[in-house]
Every structure is written in C-alpha cells, then in structure tokens.
Amino acid sequence: MWASQQVAISAILLFCKHNDAYFVKQFSNKYNVQAQQLFAKEADDYFTKNNVKITHFCNFVGTGGTIMGVQKYYESIKKPIKIVLVEPEKAQAFTEKKNTVGEHIIQGGGYGKYDLDLIEKEKIDEIKVVTDEDVKLFMDIMIKKESVLGSYSSAANIWAAVEVLKKEPNSNVFIAVCDTYLKYLSNDIEW
C-alpha cells in the first residue's frame, strides 16, 4: 500500500470512530464480491428466461468486486463464460503486471493497482485496453444515439463488448452500465 493511501485510510477510520460511521473497505471486503454475485444471478435469470447463452462478461476494473462476483457466480452454476477485464491505456496495471500511475478520463476505476485484493488474476481470460478517445466516442454513442446516461466506465464496457464482437461475432456479451452520467454533467465534454 502506498504511504498516501495509508494516511487516507487512517483519516477515514478516525472520522468513522468519531462520527458513528462505518468504513466499508470496498477494495478488500469479501461482501463486495458476494453482492455482485446477486447482480450476476439476476442478470442470468433474465438471460435464461430469454434463451440467451452468455459467452463473455466485459467490465472496467474498479475494486474488482463486480468482475469477480460475475465470474464466481457463473463458475458456481457451471456456465462457462470468458471474463474480460477492461483498463485504461494510461494506467495499464494488469497489462504491465505492476502498479502504475496515469491520468485518464474514466472516473470510478482504473486506479492503476495491480495488487487488488479482490481480483483472482488467474480467473481473468482477457484484458482489453481502452483509450480516452474511444471512451469519449462511446460516451457520445451511448448518450446521443442510444439515450443511455451511463458513466465513463460504462462506455469503456460497451467499447470492450464491441471489440469482442468484432473478433467473435456470434458471441453474447454481458456488460454493466454501472453508473449514471448525471453526476459528471459539469465535466468539459461537448455533447
């Protein structure tokens, strides 16, 4: 853990102690993964009812909870899918297999941490590296053409799904639109 992170965590714990608050430790809390298994079950119920066989799950790396929750759920029901981790070009921790530092436009993830507690690296089948330019393009498509107010990470997930479908056109790719764009409206992006 970096020294600045240790200081930040100490400050958070002190705040929690004096303000009757709880620190969820989302980067190491096993319940993060378990909660995402419930998300995967709900999605799988929908796909099963509609006779869709999922072949891939693409997800932008944040804490690692969603990608591992989906992987563990599908593994538990013995439905094999390929797990595709998406990371920003400017913080390629998983591609480079080390912690990295880089600024990118995707908020809520891409922290450049290779040593995420929740990620079981051997369970990742593929890594896709997305550029800021591709994220902007897919934000534009997602919002203007599809009327989906998703986040930057959602646009990265859609980009990765399209990349998978270019190589394997008969695939059924599952992604999460994991946040809303509404909290990013003040950003300097022209729509």
Image (cartoon, rainbow, N blue to C red):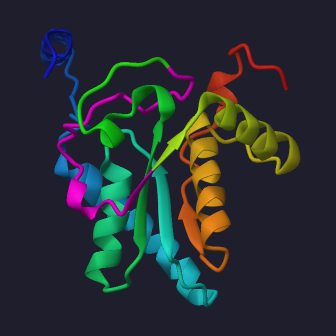
Residue occupying the point 57% across, 23% down: 105
Residue 120 location (% of width, % of height): 21, 55
95 lies left or right of 53:
left
Residue 44 shown in magenta: no
Count of marks placed on residues: 0
Q: Judge by depth and name the residue closer to the eye, 160 or 118.
A: 160
Residue occupying the point 32% across, 59% down: 124
Residue occupying the point 25% across, 37% down: 114
Residue 173 location (% of width, % of height): 57, 68
4 lies left or right of 160:
left
Residue 99 location (% of width, % of height): 25, 28
For residue 29, what is the image quadrant? top left
Residue 141 position (above or below residue 45): above
Q: Judge by depth and name the residue closer to the eye, 60 or 9.
A: 60
From the image, which quarter does the N terminus lie in?
Answer: top left
Residue 183 position (above or below residue 7): below
Q: Judge by depth and name the residue closer to the eye, 85 or 143.
A: 85
Residue 132 location (% of width, % of height): 61, 29
148 lies left or right of 179:
right
Residue occupying the point 58% across, 63% down: 164
Most common secondary structure along the magenta stretch: loop
From the image, which quarter does the C terminus lie in?
Answer: top right
Magenta residues (range): 104-127
For residue 97, what is the image quadrant? top left
